[in-house]
Each structure stands twice: as C-alpha cells, then as structure tokens.
Amino acid sequence: MRERQASQGARRAREFEAFVAGAAGRLLHAATLLTAEAPDDNPRARRLLTLALAHTYACWDRLRGEDPYDRARQYLASRFAHTAWHQYGGLGRGRPHPGSVLADLAPQERLILVLRLYEGVAEEQTAALLGLPVDRVRTICDRATATLLHPPRRPAPAVVEPKVAPS
C-alpha cells in the first residue's frame, strides 16, 4: 500500500514538473502583462504565478482530463481581478510600470485584453470567468485595443526660456 502511494506521489510530482516546465513561462508572461510590470522586475506577477501553480498542484488529482493550463490561467485571472478589486477599489488603476505596453489601461481592460488577445480565450468564456455580459467584454476589449493603437497624447514638455543677460 505504501509503495503504491509513493509511486503515485512520484508520478504526480513528475507530471506536475513537466506541466510547469512547459507552462510557467507563458503564464508568467501573461501575469506580467496583467500587472503591467517590467519583465525583469515583476514581483506581483511572480506572486500571481506562484499562487496559480500552487492552486493547480493542489487540484492536480481532481483535474480528471481537464486542461491544467486552463485551470492555472483561470486562477491567475480571477486572483488578479480579486487583488485589483481590493487594492484599488473596484478594478481601478494600479501603479503600472511606465514602460509597460499596457500601462495606459485599467486593470480590467488589461485582464480582458490579455485573456482575449494574448491567451485567445473566447468572449463567452471570458465573460463567464469574470461574471460580465458578453457585450460588456466586447466593449471593454474594443476600447482597450483602441487605447493601445491610439494612445492618449502626453503633455508637451515644458519649454524653458533661456535667460538673457541684461545689456
């Protein structure tokens, strides 16, 4: 009995390690896009990834044919939405890295854009995951895409008048 449990535990660990080796990079990139952090300085994204992988590992034996990547992505997205809601009051604006491509987007816009365009999740699945109507998801995704394609104008730099010495 103990040998069988040890064997199952080792098999589970190997399967999960193989999953992490194949999926962690993409999930980290998605988390980094969500948090709008710099790719080389992304502690919030790494925490999201760690929590998503821990949750997936805890559910590993109950997946029964379900896609573990999909489960991890769902947890990552819902955890990001939950965190953004509690930290910024609603899905308001966080403090993204100014160099991030998605820095001009609100967290909800980033979440929907990443799920729809980077991860390729259907509108219906995105809406179900976030508890929003499909039309709302479509509108938010369209607005976020328009913001990326036509970013808001930045204020012009202040012009400093040269000091002229009195003659």
Image: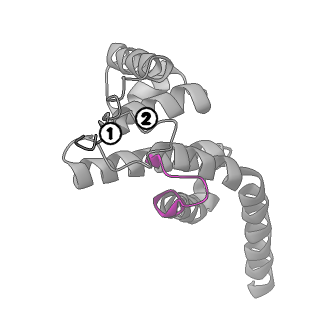
What is the basis of the colouring in this image? one colour
Crowding at mark 2 (Cα within 10 Å: few <14, some 14-19, many 20+): many
Q: Residue furthest bottom?
A: 2
Using the image as rendered, state which of residue 157 and residue 21 is in the foreground. 157
Disc 2 on helix, strand or loop?
helix
Using the image as rendered, state which of residue 148 and residue 92 is in the foreground. 148
Q: Is residue 165 above or below residue 137?
A: below
Is the residue under label 2 in contact with that under label 1 (CB below 8 Å)? no
Q: Which residues are magenta?
A: 35-46
Q: To which residue does mark 1 refer?
A: 162
Q: Residue furthest front?
A: 167
Check disc 1 and give the amino acid type: Pro
Q: Is residue 6 found left or right of 60 in the rendered image?
A: right
Name the residue at 23% across, 53% down: 86
Which of the image's four quarters has the C terminus? top left
Q: Return the x and y of residue 105 as percentages of the image width and height.
A: 38, 33
Name the residue at 36% across, 39% down: 107
Q: To which residue does mark 2 refer?
A: 110
Q: Quadrant of residue 104?
A: top left
Using the image as rendered, state which of residue 104 and residue 68 is in the foreground. 104
Disc 1 on helix, strand or loop?
loop
Does the magenta-highlighted stretch encompass residue 67? no
Q: CA separation, marks 1 and 2? A: 43 Å
Q: Which label is found at residue 89? A: none
